[in-house]
Amino acid sequence: MHVKHGMFRPDVARSEAAGPGLALPLASRSAFILLLLGLWSTGLHAQSISPQPEPGLWRSEATTLINGKDLQAALRSNQEDMFKDLPEEQRAMLREALGDPPEIGVDMECISAEDARNLTNPEKLIDSARKDMPECTLQAEEASESSLRVIGNCTGSDGFNGDMHGELTMVSPREMRTRFTGQGVMQLDAEQAPEHLQHVATGEPVNIEHSEKSTWVSADCGALQSSELNY
């Protein structure tokens, strides 16, 4: 799992439901936990957050606003546009070959018992956060037994540059919520940026609001296998 310049880019075992070209701070509850818990250990003497999440299959639903524009809605619209002009026969062939389109803004993630323990181990998390976000300065703002807030600033040649605020709340062993806000600019190559990010690829000020709710689904991950997190 990697966090780069304020862009949460998970590669834990999960379904690819966020859509292509989604280089934004969204998609993964566990990536946010990596950032928040890792920073927490620096400012709060390595206390552990609780409760610990249950191992198994987790489902995360995300909503992201870029300058007030719903990014998931834009992705869904793009997805629909890909199919609407095709003859029904071609649409049926595509569905048979590719399966049903992924649910935009939804991730399925398999968390092993070791992953669950590590997600509340500040010492391991801080090392990964420092490695993955070398151009970000971050610090804990306040915390409680089950929640944490951080503030920070990122500067670099790629990704999000600006101020950020994040919050993680462990509601229960089977539910966690994250919230991220950022004010700054997106450093993107306009020629390579996907259509839904063209309006922020020019270096104009950007306001990002991202919220995510993750819930435990079952102890059995089925075909979705867990992979070792980047500690």
Image (tube, grey):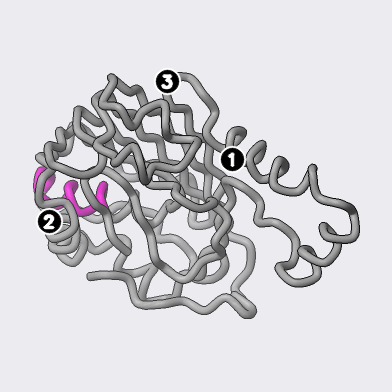
Eye-nearest disc, 3 or 2: 3
Query: Which one is in front, 86 or 66?
Result: 86
Location of mark 1 (residue): 75
> Quick one: SS at disc 1?
helix
10 Å neighbourhood of mark 3: few (<14), some, or many (≥20)?
some
Image quarter in which the N terminus is found:
bottom left
Q: Amino acid at mark 1?
A: Leu
Q: Nearer the viewer, residue 217 or 109?
A: 109
Question: Real-space Cα distance between discs 3 and 2?
Answer: 29 Å
Please give the residue where the numbered disc 2 appears in the rendered image: 130
Label 3 belongs to which residue?
67
Tell which circle, 3 or 2, labels the residue nearer the N-terminal end: 3
The quadrant in which the C terminus is found is: bottom left
Q: Is residue 115 left or right of residue 212?
A: left
- Seen in the picture, residue 97 relative to 156 is either above or below; the reply is below
- Marks 1 and 3 close (CB-CB < 8 Å): no
Q: Which residues are magenta?
A: 35-44
